[in-house]
Amino acid sequence: MTEERPDATDAGRRRGAHDGEGSAAGARAGEGSAAGAHAGEAGAAGTRGPGSASRGRGDAPATTARGQGDGAASRSVEGSQRVFLVRGADASLVSAAGASLVARIVGTEDASLVVEHLEGPELDAGQVLAACQTLPFLATQRVVVVRDAGSLPADVGEALSRYVAAPTPTTVLVLLAAGGRVPAALVKAVRTLGAVVETDPPTGRARQDWILERLADAPVRLRRDAVAALAAHLGEDLRRLDGILAALAAAHGPQATVGAAELEPFLGEAGDLPPWALTDAIDAGDEPRALATLRRMLVAGQRAPLAIMASLHRHFAGALALDGAEVSSPAEAAAALGVSSTFVAGKALALQRRLGSDGLADAFGLLAEADLDLRGRSGLPGEVVLEILVGRLARANRARSRRTGTKRASA
């Protein structure tokens, strides 16, 4: 069966805001089929253009874009923009987006004659301004790349903020910031007069589109079953995506078509999952999925047992806060809980209705016992304590769901 790539319009229709604990492709353990369904709509991948745009004083509109590797670079370079800020929490994603952006700017010219790299923490204002104002030699332009822009000295940040207002016409300045703090005045200047490329993966349903967009520019093509398997396996650890794709290209050749069977040897250890993947499995009464999710959070995510315990407590506390309250809809539950997301509030309301006062009391009894055991009462390892707790909570939800279903059927 021939796989088809969707166009940008198809991908755009599937995007949208999804508050709180919205579903993300592959982020839920055991829900690869859901990712596969999305992949079925999209084939191998989709693309989208930059995000919001605001007019600056330069010749071209300023842009804020979300980075997606090579695709982000090609979609970020517009008109005569001369300054870019590539930023995000993950250094590998920032580096990849920055390299793609620079390659796009350089084009067919000799990069050794065009590109100059500078290290942010070691710069002084004179050095960076001299680099930006130097005219090109045996080339039509210069590209000055400033790494670790989140650690720039204050005077350099101020000098660059002034430079952005009147950049050298033959120089493109690229600032790479993975962590740290880019001076607010510099960020504002770049956003107004240049382009800011955000590399952090989005949350909720938009994460599915982020993966598909990366796959659109991948060196190999993935069949639908491989897309579903890859998304489910990576979970929250999306920084591994580019490495897996590069390894597949090296093994099978550029533009090779890869299925789930060919992908499996390259996956390695399953990635981390978000806390809501665990609470969703518990609420569904799916003990095997809940335990598998817990193990991924502990191993791949290296999450502390007490941190996971805190997430579970918050989850059940939301349902407890609605116990006895006169609410009948997610909107009313959101108002009672003081949250903006009706999706999150709807989950809390469903949990409260399913467990009832007695079930919530039992759940908090289990949480209290496990908390004491985590703090040393039983002497058991924290991972074991959590496995026991998660198993008991999932079984309790399953039993309550069956009981509720029986009552409805008899009614």
Image (cartoon, helix red, strand yellow):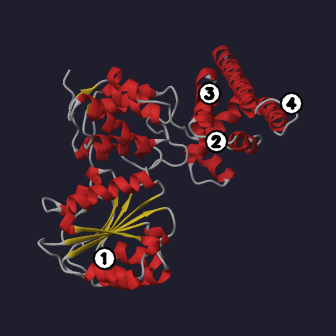
115 sits to left or right of 37: left
**Whole-number angstrom distance, CA of label 1 to CA of label 4:** 60 Å
Residue 406 placement (x, y as % from top left): 67, 15
Residue 305 placement (x, y as % from top left): 71, 39
Residue beneath disc 1: 193
Mark 2 and 3 residues: CB-CB less than 8 Å, in contact? no
Residue beneath disc 2: 303
144 sits to left or right of 321: left
Residue 403 placement (x, y as % from top left): 70, 18
Residue type (three-letter) at the residue carrying disc 1: Leu
Q: Residues within 10 Å of mark 4 (few under 14, many from 20)?
A: few
Residue 183 placement (x, y as % from top left): 47, 76
323 sits to left or right of 139: right
**Whole-number angstrom distance, CA of label 3 to CA of label 4:** 23 Å
Mark 2 or mark 4, earlier in chain = 2
Residue beneath disc 3: 290
Q: Which mark is in front, 2 or 1?
A: 2
Q: Residues within 10 Å of mark 1 (few under 14, many from 20)?
A: many
Badge 1 marks a residue whose secondary structure is: helix
Residue type (three-letter) at the residue carrying disc 4: Ser
Disc number at residue 10? Answer: none
Q: In the rendered image of this protein, does residue 408 appear above or below residue 48? A: above
Mark 1 and 3 residues: CB-CB less than 8 Å, in contact? no
Residue beneath disc 4: 378
Badge 4 marks a residue whose secondary structure is: loop
Query: Which is nearer the eye, 80 or 394?
Result: 80
**Whole-number angstrom distance, CA of label 2 to CA of label 1:** 41 Å
Query: Which is nearer the eye, 92 or 291?
Result: 92
Residue type (three-letter) at the residue carrying disc 2: Arg
